[in-house]
Image (tube, rainbow, N blue to C red):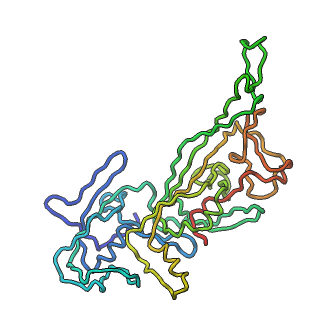
Amino acid sequence: MASVLLPNYWERIDSVSPSQASFGPDGGSASMEFIVSRGNIGYVLADILGSAIINANGSLSRVLPLAHPEYNWLYASKITSLQGVGAAGAYDAQNSTLSLQDDVDRKLPSFLAVYEKYKIGVQFEARPYLVLSDSQTWQFAAGRSHYDTKGFQQMFQDYGEYRRFSKMVRTPTAEFLASNNGTFFFQSPDLPAGLAQATSATTGAGPQIVVMKSKVVVTWFFVPYRMVTSINIRQASGRLNWHSEAGQAGAFFGFEQGSLLFEGIEIAEYPGPFPTTPINFGVPPASDLIDASIYNNKYCDISFIFSEFTVPTEMQAAGPVNRLQISGAIYEHHNRLPHVGLMKYLYVCNNFQAATGLPIYWSFNMKKLFRFDA
């Protein structure tokens, strides 16, 4: 077990343990109290809940949250209390070792009391995703690609960030396609002379064809807020999932090519547990640096929203013989529509000739959503 043992945390003990734990079918939780020396308080506060930054190569570097020493599948989710023990005097507020050293105007009390040690209460909970270190994640890094609408290959390095701090939720939905008059026929010996009748406004509207779909939401947790400005999110909008690896092994969260249509993102933002980056005013009136500081010390959970539509193999008619000779074109699932005559789903494009017609939706490698590119 490649665990990193930290010597700065001393559990508080008593005749009755201050630490507690509880477990149920929906997970577990625990709480502990630590005694930390004054010299380590800054390090400990920044270390307990973890942090994340965007690297120059587009990946994330994460400081993982503290794991419970007994139940190591539980991770620190909140610092519930911070209390000084053993008064050691007072400090000038301007000399605080925890405050950000920046030029932001603030109103502060002149002095603050300091203590020899601090008692820290920490809440631990199970996470609904894998908590992996940088090295464990990046060992699977590999070159990937996708194609633009002109068929040119676009290469990128996939660091596999979707394998950690992410989860997928799938909710079934349904769409109804109204059939045109005369498309279907009523069949019964009870009809006049037992003859079939075409559906019409007189005899009754045609059936509504039920198209079974799902709403797929992939949520990426505890991400630096600047990630929402990545150009990859804009480029992926309105496109279908495509993977460069052979076979289904490289599928995005297990979905077949063309079955996921990316609709956009939802953002849940929060300030983060511990600010680490000072606000940079630069040299006014130039505002580039202060504008960039908007994203500092902020985190968010990004939910990638997809419409999922998978056509069963037996419901797919054969694809076109003369296909569009551009790599990245997808002929399955979202790029198919129901054909009443064959009662199957057929590929459709915008041209009489399949070799020159473009599909309804173009493709994108959705793994690229999990890296930052300006």
Lateral position of residue 332 relative to residue 264, left or right: right
Lateral position of residue 174 relative to residue 64, left or right: right
x, y percentage for residue 323?
82, 51
Q: Farthest residue to the left: give it.
A: 15
Quarter of the figure that contains the N terminus: bottom left
Please give the name of the residue rendered at 27% of the width and 59% of the height, measured from the top-left corner: 31
Q: Farthest residue to the right: give it.
A: 353
Quarter of the figure that contains the C terminus: bottom right
x, y percentage for residue 64?
41, 67
Between 104 and 125, the one lying in front of the other is: 104
Tell me, yes or no, if residue 164 can be seen here.
Answer: no
x, y percentage for residue 372?
57, 69
Q: Residue 272 sits in which quadrant?
A: bottom left
Q: Is residue 242 above or below residue 295?
A: above
Lateral position of residue 168 relative to residue 272, left or right: right
Q: Farthest residue to the front: give it.
A: 202
x, y percentage for residue 322?
85, 49
Tell me, yes or no, if residue 145 can be seen here.
Answer: yes
Q: Is residue 284 above or below residue 265?
A: below
Between 200 and 84, the one lying in front of the other is: 200
* Count of labels in the image: 0
Please give the name of the residue rendered at 31% of the width and 82% of the height, measured from the top-left corner: 97
